[in-house]
């Protein structure tokens, strides 16, 4: 049983420009998805993840192919609900979405966005830990840039629970920043990602302060580790359907 939350949104603006790491005044503290991050998140993720908009849009198209009327999709680590909205946009009105995040600020922001939609009632917003929230009868589960924030030793458990919660022909979408290989190609991907952030207007100071804040918080895995883990979790097959620099997405099926 999942519990929806009553979302209070006290004048929360969620489209501010991301300048959180611009100042060298305060010491860098570990990154948290708090109210400050929620306020700037759309700008932050667009300027930090190459191809983010396309990744989200394509996730909606996958949902359109997979989710039939009266089925349910899980958006796990939903933040402000970009993937949730892509699913709503692409699927039949009988398809429901359970959007889960353990950040109260993100769930509040999601509530504000859903309140502006006519189809927002198709979504159950849940402020909970994806590691413990029940996952049942899912046609589709999405982990869009979320697994990288789960402790590495607990990632297999989460994937096993998702696998067990899918309907027979259900699928998982997994998108992650990957740990680039320690070779010429990997170094190029890493350098190009920094170039991308600079081209989006981030200063070298902001890039380096955010990198320090994310250290030990966002722990990327190598592609091979992800693929071994998908198999170990019980998925019988998967394919990579997206890569932009060091960001990769898979679809995995039962
Ligand atoms: C990079 S954001 C995900 C972006 C989002 N899926 C999108 O497409 O815009 C990671 C999100 O995962 C959430 N998160 C991290 N660990 C979590 C956990 N254990 N349970 C629930 N949410 C979690 C964070 O609060 C954050 O909102």
Image (spheres, rainbow, N blue to C red):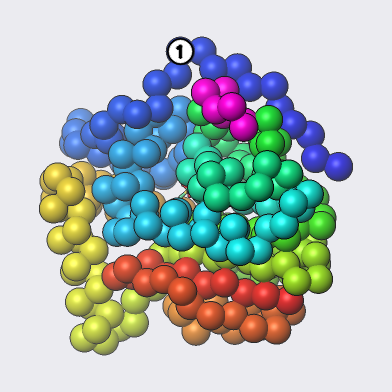
Mark 1, other Cα within 10 Å: few <14 / some 14–19 / many ≥20:
few
Q: Is residue 151 magenta?
A: no
Q: Is residue 117 magenta?
A: yes
Q: Quadrant of the N terminus?
A: top right
Image position, residue 30 (x, y; %) = 41, 44
Horizontal side of residue 85 vs 207, given as left or right: right
Q: Pick the residue in front: 119 or 174.
A: 119
The answer to whether residue 148 is above or below residue 168 is above
Rendering coords of residue 61 (x, y %): 52, 59
Q: Residue furthest right?
A: 1
Residue matched to label 1: 11
Q: Is residue 112 above or below residue 173?
A: above
- Residue 189 at x, y percent in the picture: 25, 73
Q: Does residue 46 appear anywhere in the picture? A: yes
Residue lying at 46% horizontally and 13% vertically, measured from the top left: 11
Segment colored magenta: 114-120
4 vs 1, left or right, is left
């Amino acid at each position: 049983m999942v519990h929806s939350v009553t979302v209070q949104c006290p004048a929360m603006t969620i489209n501010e420009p991301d300048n959180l790491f611009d100042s060298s005044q305060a010491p860098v503290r570990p990154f948290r998805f708090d109210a400050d991050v929620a306020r700037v998140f759309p700008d932050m993720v667009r300027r930090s993840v190459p191809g983010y908009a396309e990744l989200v849009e394509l996730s909606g198209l996958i949902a359109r192919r997979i989710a039939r009327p009266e089925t349910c999709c899980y958006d796990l680590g939903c933040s402000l609900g970009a993937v949730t909205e892509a699913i709503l946009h692409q699927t039949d009105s009988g398809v429901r979405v359970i959007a889960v995040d353990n950040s109260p600020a993100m769930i509040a922001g999601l509530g504000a966005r859903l309140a502006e939609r006519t189809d927002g009632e198709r979504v159950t917003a849940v402020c909970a830990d994806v590691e413990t929230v029940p996952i049942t009868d899912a046609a589709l589960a999405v982990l869009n840039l979320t697994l990288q924030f789960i402790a590495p030793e607990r990632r297999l458990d989460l994937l096993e629970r998702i696998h067990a919660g899918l309907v027979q022909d259900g699928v998982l979408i997994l998108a992650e920043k990957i740990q680039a290989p320690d070779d010429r190609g990997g170094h190029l991907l890493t350098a190009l990602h920094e170039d991308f952030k600079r081209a989006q207007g981030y200063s070298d100071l902001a890039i380096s302060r955010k990198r320090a804040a994310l250290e030990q918080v966002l722990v990327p895995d190598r592609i091979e580790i992800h693929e071994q883990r998908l198999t170990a979790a019980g998925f019988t097959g998967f394919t990579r359907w997206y890569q932009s620099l060091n960001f990769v997405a898979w679809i995995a099926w039962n």
